[in-house]
């Protein structure tokens, strides 16, 4: 390998697939549980980590959602996002678009306002850390459409605080078309749109086709099953569709990290990016993900640099801004 882990860590990069709720590290979880008097059934870091028992998306989500009970106050949401941004800085993340799941909080009595104000405060402050941050509001696809509609309505007074709408949670029996109308509305309202097409789901390729051809998303979160249909791969490349891949996360919820598929798509010229998804649970932040993928699948330096460039190219920022960030990457490469 003609590059080191330090080289990857120092590369200016964007993170586009990061669930803020997935950055809840055991120490913060314990701290907030004490502060808010929430019994989480675990008393120390070892016990919290021992509860991380999952081997697919459904079993992961069963651990993931109950942990969120410790998030109660605006300051808790702020603390969570701020802690992630401090970590992101260490990995030289310069720009990030952060997912959050309001329904996971409003469904247990925390107001939308509490959630968005806490997260947005950290997002605004990110500038002080040298990071530009944006928020993507996700709908939980395993909740009824009616709940997504109500959430969209709650969001409208805060529309200027988010950049896009996303779709996450359990894909089983929850196809993208269930949310077609609300995504159409979001587009009309000037928001960007992206959807999860998780790895190896029932009907993965059908869902990817619906997302691309019917709903016309700008990005797909995960989405490597697209390799099953060469005509869709061509379509995605032609239309500059971003793929926010998460190799380490994949290796927790499926049998492999899907590195072969990522490398194939990258070689073809697809906008493949590498991200950490839920780093507190998979114990891997963005540079760790990039290094794990690059070393296991023997990516050359040029491919690693392309991944960093793609992270900006697949973002929802303006072309002018993208150019400025690409220049940062080039300058870094020249020096290293
Ligand atoms: N929520 C958090 N992580 C997720 C993932 N990988 N897929 C779907 N929903 C999620
Ligand atoms: Zn995700």
Image (cartoon, rainbow, N blue to C red):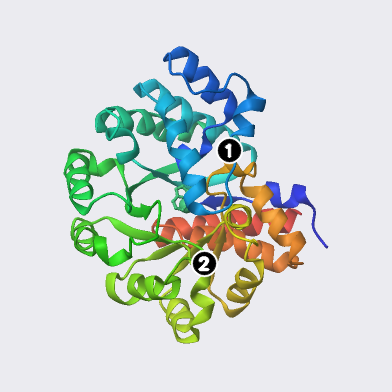
On the image, the x and y values in percent for residue 50 come to: 64, 33
Residue 268 against residue 56 in the figure, above or below? below
The quadrant of the image that shows the N terminus is bottom right
Gap between marks 1 and 2 measured at Cα: 23 Å
Q: Confirm whether residue 102 shows in the render.
A: no
Depth check, front residue: 136 or 199: 199
Residue found at x 32% / y 31%:
115
Check disc 2 and report the residue beneath it.
Answer: 200
What label does residue 196 carry, if any?
A: none
Residue found at x 65% / y 52%:
289
Check disc 1 and report the residue beneath it.
Answer: 280
Q: Is residue 334 left or right of residue 281?
A: right
On the image, the x and y values in percent for residue 96 come to: 48, 47
Q: Residue lying furthest bottom in this view?
A: 231
Label 1 CB, ligand 1: below 8 Å? Answer: no
On the image, the x and y values in percent for residue 34 come to: 49, 14
Element class at badge 2: loop
Residue 160 against residue 326 in the figure, above or below? above
């Amino acid at each position: 390998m003609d590059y080191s882990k330090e080289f990857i860590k120092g590369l200016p990069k964007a993170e586009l697939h990061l669930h803020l709720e997935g950055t809840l590290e055991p120490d913060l979880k314990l701290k907030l549980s004490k502060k808010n008097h929430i019994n989480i059934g675990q008393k120390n870091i070892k016990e919290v980590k021992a509860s991380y028992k999952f081997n697919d998306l459904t079993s992961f989500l069963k651990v993931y959602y109950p942990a969120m009970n410790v998030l109660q106050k605006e300051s808790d949401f702020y603390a969570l996002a701020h802690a992630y941004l401090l970590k992101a800085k260490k990995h030289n993340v310069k720009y990030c678009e952060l997912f959050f799941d309001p329904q996971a909080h409003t469904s247990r009595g925390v107001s939308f306002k509490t959630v968005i104000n806490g997260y947005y405060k950290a997002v605004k402050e990110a500038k002080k850390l040298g990071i530009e941050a944006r928020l993507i509001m996700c709908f939980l696809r395993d909740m009824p459409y009616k709940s997504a509609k109500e959430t969209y309505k709650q969001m409208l007074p805060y529309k200027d605080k988010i950049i896009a709408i996303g779709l996450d949670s359990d894909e089983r029996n929850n196809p993208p078309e269930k949310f077609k109308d609300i995504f159409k509305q979001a587009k009309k309202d000037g928001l960007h749109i992206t959807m999860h097409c998780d790895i190896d789901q029932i009907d993965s390729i059908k869902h990817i086709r619906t997302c691309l051809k019917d709903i016309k998303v700008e990005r797909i979160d995960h989405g490597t099953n697209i390799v099953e249909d060469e005509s869709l791969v061509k379509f995605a490349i032609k239309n500059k569709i971003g793929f926010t891949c998460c190799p380490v996360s994949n290796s927790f919820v499926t049998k492999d990290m899907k590195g072969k598929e990522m490398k194939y798509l990258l070689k073809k010229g697809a906008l493949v990016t590498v991200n950490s998804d839920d780093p507190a649970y998979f114990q891997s932040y963005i540079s760790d993900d990039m290094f794990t993928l690059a070393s296991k699948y023997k990516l050359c330096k040029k491919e690693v640099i392309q991944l960093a460039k793609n992270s900006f190219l697949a973002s929802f920022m303006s072309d002018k801004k993208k150019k400025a960030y690409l220049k940062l990457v080039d300058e870094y490469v020249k020096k290293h």
